[in-house]
Amino acid sequence: MTKNSREILIKKANEMLDYAYVPYSNFPVGAAILSRTGEIFTGCNVENSSYGLSNCAERTAIFKAVSEGSQEFDKMVITGNTDGPISPCGACRQVISEFCAPDMPVILTNVDGNIKETTVGALLPGAFTPEDLKD
Ligand code: THU
């Protein structure tokens, strides 16, 4: 993963903020994830008048990727209009942990370009994973 492709992911994640459907929270979130095969999948949050049905940006991106045949990933970027780098919610940390290795880099950023680079394992230590279901 080159620095250049990290910048591409950041750009694409920020572009998703314009597509977010957020009439209830007015809090757009964007995400972009790089597949092992070099494809980028993007996502935004999509809310619903039945609030609990709203889907976060990270899960939109991952569900788009999986439904298009990609299940292995190398890097993810998440962004929002937050004071500092955005913090992904617990549900999204769990879904990211389902598909991404603990050492996979996750770039948390915001519209001002503040960046915090972390990992899947640091975001959700001790995650429940498919391995836990094995005998
Ligand atoms: N949201 C995300 O899209 N990702 C997160 O990790 C945090 C929260 C969305 C859900 C809802 O549409 C809005 O942000 C406010 O919670």
Image: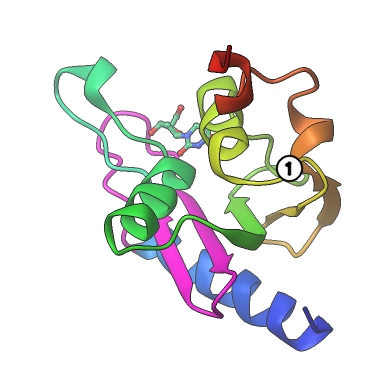
* Location of residue 128 in the rendering, given as x and y in whole percent from the top left corner: 63, 17
Badge 1 crowding class, 10 Å Cα cut-off, few under 14, some 14 to 19, many 20 or more, is: few
Q: Which residue is mark 1?
A: 83
Q: Is residue 92 magenta?
A: no
Residue 44 visible in the snapshot: no
Compared to 118, does 14 lie above or below?
below
* Location of residue 118 in the rendering, given as x and y in whole percent from the top left corner: 84, 46
Compared to 20, does 2 lie above or below?
below
* Horizontal side, residue 109 vs residue 2: left or right: left
Q: Is residue 23 magenta?
A: yes
* Location of residue 2 in the rendering, given as x and y in whole percent from the top left corner: 80, 84
Q: Secondary structure at mark 1?
A: loop
Residue 99 in which image quadrant: top right
Compared to 127, does 115 lie above or below?
below
Q: Nearer the viewer, residue 19 or 96?
A: 96
**Residue at 80%, 22% in the rendered image:** 125
Residue 122 in which image quadrant: top right
Q: If the image is split into quadrants, where does the N terminus sit?
A: bottom right
Q: Which residues are magenta?
A: 19-43
* Horizontal side, residue 29 vs residue 100: left or right: left
* Horizontal side, residue 44 vs residue 51: left or right: right
Q: Nearer the viewer, residue 88 or 131?
A: 131
**Residue at 49%, 45% in the rendered image:** 58
Q: Residue flagged by tag 1: what amino acid is it?
A: Asp
Residue 103 visible in the snapshot: yes
